Image (cartoon, helix red, strand yellow):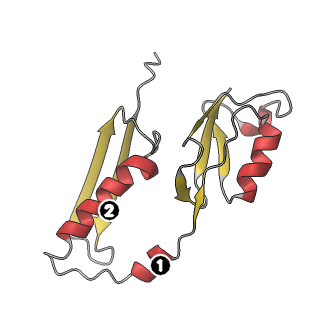
């Protein structure tokens, strides 16, 4: 049964070399600009929590350079486009496209029109993020 409600989560461990903290953030039916993906709404909460507790533990943020090198992109608006057009646009932006409950190889990409997308257009995400669509 589809209730049109979402559960999103983020799981983090620190420090990665010798874990002392495990953090699970779970949000039930999140709303707002972050969409419904853990990376858009739950991960920022986890990041904020880590930024506040790790200094008390005197844990260095040794991988900070790597974290800052992750390139972010703005999610393009692909609603109203067919899958073939949308795939080209998201690929140009370093993103991928997924359709819930469907194998992308079996979809009629020329005649399947996108009606909804998550994350929504304009949301800033990391390159490599998947844009989930519904037709």
Disc 2 or 1, which lies upstream in sequence?
A: 2
Q: Toward the viewer: 107 or 92?
A: 92
Residue density around tag 2, few if under 14, some if 14–19, many if 20 or more, within 10 Å:
few
Q: In the image, residue 64 lies at what x, y percent?
A: 39, 79
**Residue located farthest toward the front when viewing the structure as drawn:** 122
Q: Residues within 10 Å of mark 1 (few under 14, many from 20)?
A: few
Q: Residue furthest left?
A: 56
| Label 2: element kind | helix
From the viewer's perspective, is residue 64 above or below residue 127? Answer: below
Picture coordinates of residue 79, whole percent (x, y) = 69, 34
Residue at 60%, 49% (x, y): give it.
130
Left or right of 14, for residue 116: right
Which residue is tagged 2?
47
Q: Residue at x 47, y 75 (%)?
A: 68
- Expressed as whole percent of the image width and height from the top left, the position of residue 133 reads 63, 35
**Quadrant of the image occupied by residue 33:** top left
Residue at position x 82%, y 40% in the image: 84
Q: Quadrant of residue 77?
A: top right
- 6 up-or-down from 68: above or below: above
Q: Position of residue 122 (x, y in %)?
A: 57, 48
Number of callouts in the render? 2
Secondary-structure class at tag 1: helix
Look at the numbered discs 2 and 1 and tell me whether their residues touch, using CB distance below 8 Å: no
Quadrant where the C terminus is found in the figure: top right
Q: Which residue is mark 1?
A: 66
Q: CA distance from mark 2 to mark 1?
A: 15 Å
Left or right of 133 in this view: 110: right
Tell me the residue at 71%/51% (across/down): 90
């Amino acid at each position: 049964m589809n209730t049109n409600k979402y559960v999103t989560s983020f799981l983090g461990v620190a420090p990665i070399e010798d874990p002392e903290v495990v953090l699970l953030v779970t949000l039930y039916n999140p709303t707002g600009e972050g969409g419904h993906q853990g990376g858009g709404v739950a991960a920022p909460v986890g990041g904020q929590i880590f930024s506040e507790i790790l200094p008390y533990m005197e844990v260095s943020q040794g991988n900070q350079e790597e974290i800052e090198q992750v390139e972010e992109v703005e999610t393009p608006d692909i609603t109203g486009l067919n899958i073939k057009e949308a795939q080209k646009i998201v690929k140009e932006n370093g993103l991928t496209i997924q359709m819930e409950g469907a194998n992308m190889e079996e979809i009629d990409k020329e005649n399947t029109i996108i009606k909804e997308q998550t994350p929504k257009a304009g949301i800033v995400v990391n390159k490599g993020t998947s844009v989930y669509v519904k037709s």
